[in-house]
Amino acid sequence: MNPILLVIPILSVLMFDLGLSLNLADFKRIFAQPKAATIGLLGQIVVLPVIAFALALILDLQPLFFVGFILIACCPGGSSSNIFSKLAKGDVALSVTLTAFSSIITLFTLPLIMSWAVNYSQSSSLAADIHLPVGNLLIQNIVLMLIPILLGIGMRLKWPNAAHTTDRVLSKIAFPALMLLAGIFFVQHHETIGQNIGSLGGGLTLLIIVAAGVAALMAKAVRLPVQQRRTIIIEVGMQNAAQAIAVASSPFIFNEPKMAIPAIIYALLMNVVLLTYVGFIKYRNK
């Protein structure tokens, strides 16, 4: 089975469900809570890619993994971050706002950063023959992400009761669907994953922990409340793996399933790391 046939509907459903959960207050919150929103977005859009680039260089990853490693760091926050924020007793409303704004902002920052990453891989010692059709990437992002978000917002405005019911259903199937996708990729690429799990697994774990740690220090430096600090840690540590898989494996963009392997491993590790973080919070509270 071609994984792209699962990636496209899963990503679109995740973005549609995000739209269902949004209201006007979520967009106003970025102005009502500018410090929290700024730190959260800086952590996702600036800090995470910088750390990913540094780690990819240190690990001396082969070209496809190098680009795939940076790709996951350029994606927006994952929709499951809202659930994790709730479990951690964080600021769920802030989580929704950050996920929404990062999903919109990265429509434009992702092509810019990935163009640079591809050019670097071609001009450096990596000597990669990787090409990025930026126009196709923009179109795919708009079709698979922006339009579903807008449709979800429209449904919530027009039929709020139906939107609430639909959101309850979709929020329950989103995570299992992503894990199913990860499982299919593991089966198809188990030999390559097995050969590189040490460097990729360790590097991605460091990426999550270091980026979340830097974001936590930034949030503490501006004296954000503990609930907002928890949410920012989760938002920076949990990116939209489905989008990274879609970009890497799409026949219209990279068409390199091997490039999606970092995102597949990340999809599993981010849940393990952040569940551990949530468990630590609950244990400490007791």
Image: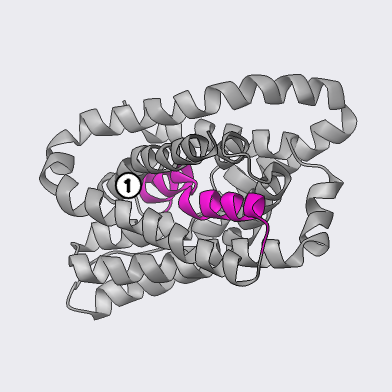
**Residue 37, image quadrant:** bottom right
Residue under the image location 44 percent in, 40 percent down: 280
Q: Which residue is mark 1?
A: 260
Report the span colored magenta.
Answer: 224-253
Res 8 visible: yes
Residue under the image location 34 percent in, 69 percent down: 53
Res 109 visible: no
Q: Does 250 appear in magenta?
A: yes
**Residue 19, image quadrant:** top right
Most foreground residue, 91 or 239: 91
Residue 107's spot in the image, x, y percent? 59, 58
Where 97 sits versus 157, above or below? below
Residue reaching furthest to the front: 286
Residue under the image location 44 percent in, 31 percent down: 178
Residue under the image location 22 percent in, 79 percent down: 124
> Could you tell whether 156 is left or right of 229 in the image?
right
Element under disc 1: helix
Where 195 sits versus 187, above or below? below
**Residue 194, image quadrant:** top left
Query: Three-letter amino acid code at disc 1?
Result: Ala
Residue 277's spot in the image, x, y percent? 44, 43
Crowding near the residue tagged with mark 1, few <14, some 14–19, many ≥20 C-alpha atoms within 10 Å: many
Q: Does 145 appear in magenta?
A: no
